[in-house]
Image (cartoon, rainbow, N blue to C red):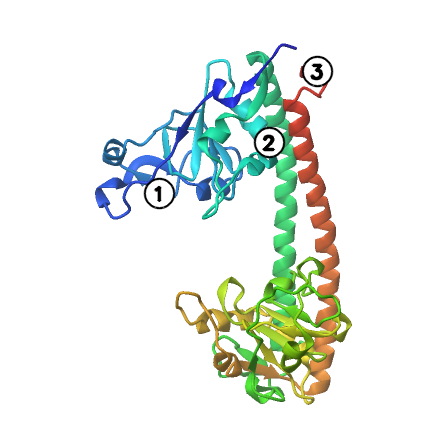
Amino acid sequence: MTVRSGAIRHFAKIKNGSTPASGEPSFWDGDIAWATPDDLGRLDGKFISKTKRNITPLAVAENNLNVVPPGTVLLSTRAPIGHMAINTSPMAFNQGCRALIPQPETHGPFLFYLLESRIPELNASANGTTFVELSRDDLACVRISLPSLDTQKRIAAFLDEKTKRIDALIANKRALLERLTEKRHAIITHAVTKGLSPAVPMMNSGIDWLGEIPAHWKVKRLKYLTRAPLKYGANASAEWNEPDWPRFIRITDVDQSGNLRPDTFRSLPPEVAEPYLLAEGDILLARSGATVGKSFIYRKDWGAACFAGYLILARIGRHHSADFIYQYLNSDAFWSWAGASLIQSTIQNISAERYANLWVPCPPLSEQIAIADAVSLLRSQIADRERKVEQSLNMLNEYRSSLVTAAVTGQLEGLR
């Protein structure tokens, strides 16, 4: 098999992108598609025909923008680096992307797959302080090897067929994960707002986002269920990693299963941590940023731990079940309240005062415990299924990646 090797600039013309002035109405809402890394990242396949925003011919002329022909490979070169697509119509693009226009002896779809196999290398070549970027020069110098044009077309056609099947399986697995997530939320929400028995009389809770609850339940504000007022955590930096000191918990340490991630361990000196030490069943609430509303329940098995300033402690009193309240904090009812309670500022947040006034459905203590136990068991069963699906999904992604790499590097018999 004849192979040509060299810098990628010898096999494709590389063009930079740009953004017209956002405040100039005559530049926007035209009929020329204008791609961004976000557009590339939202695609299910490898082709792009429409973009979130369009620009006008005036924007192209006044700003000297590159409009590339169909069949061009568009690559996001600012973090995240590696989103790609092939355009099916003339298209402009912003500075977060670069375009590779294939030379006559370069087949665009093959170049797409070849670059897909080199994404880790492209990321390793990126640099920057304000933001990480793969420069035009660094991209142009990436060395690649291309077989004959006919061989490129055969390999691309083979990968089109194979990856279509794999991608369909991946889509099915992702859809299953979404359904499992929906099922988990539905189970939690029904149990903590309606109870486990379908035959009990119901009453209006008087709270729009809570709806009807069993008639023998009560509704109380969170501040009346705690032993002490809600409390903010330690305003300290996470600079220590001493394993014998109390762990310094931040909300980013909590994984999707509600466990603490071992790879993010940080600690505080005992004398600093002491006022913020956690007890069994303490609930932590995120108060700002992207994770606002997320919660965590502490178990003593984690070892001594304290909590960060962007978290709020709710220490539940002995007449109520912390586990029940934690499950409630993961229900759709709670998230409806959280969405309506956000304080919109530079960073969205929910203060301790607002959390304190959260309405909580309160069954008798014995029923709280029974509901929490039942929900915990069902969540565990769903989590087991999710782990198996995720393992299968990871295997499919790894197989797809290895297949693409093997094909574009000539390792598959019959495609050389």
Would you place residue 30 above or below residue 188 in this image? above
Give how far apart the Cα atoms at labels 2 and 1 are: 29 Å
Image mark for residue 118: 2
- The three-letter amino acid code for the residue at tag 3 is Gly
- Label 3 environment density (alpha carbons within 10 Å; few <14, some 14–19, many ≥20): few
Give how far apart the Cα atoms at labels 2 and 3 are: 23 Å
Mark 3 secondary-structure assignment: loop
Mark 2 secondary-structure assignment: loop
Q: Is residue 148 left or right of residue 410?
A: left
Image mark for residue 168: none
Q: Quick one: quadrant of the N terminus?
A: top right
- For the question of whether residue 355 can be seen, the reply is yes
Badge 2 or badge 1: first in the primary sequence: 1
According to the picture, the residue beneath numbered tag 3 turns out to be 414
- Could you say which quadrant of the image residue 373 lies in? bottom right
According to the picture, the residue beneath numbered tag 1 turns out to be 53
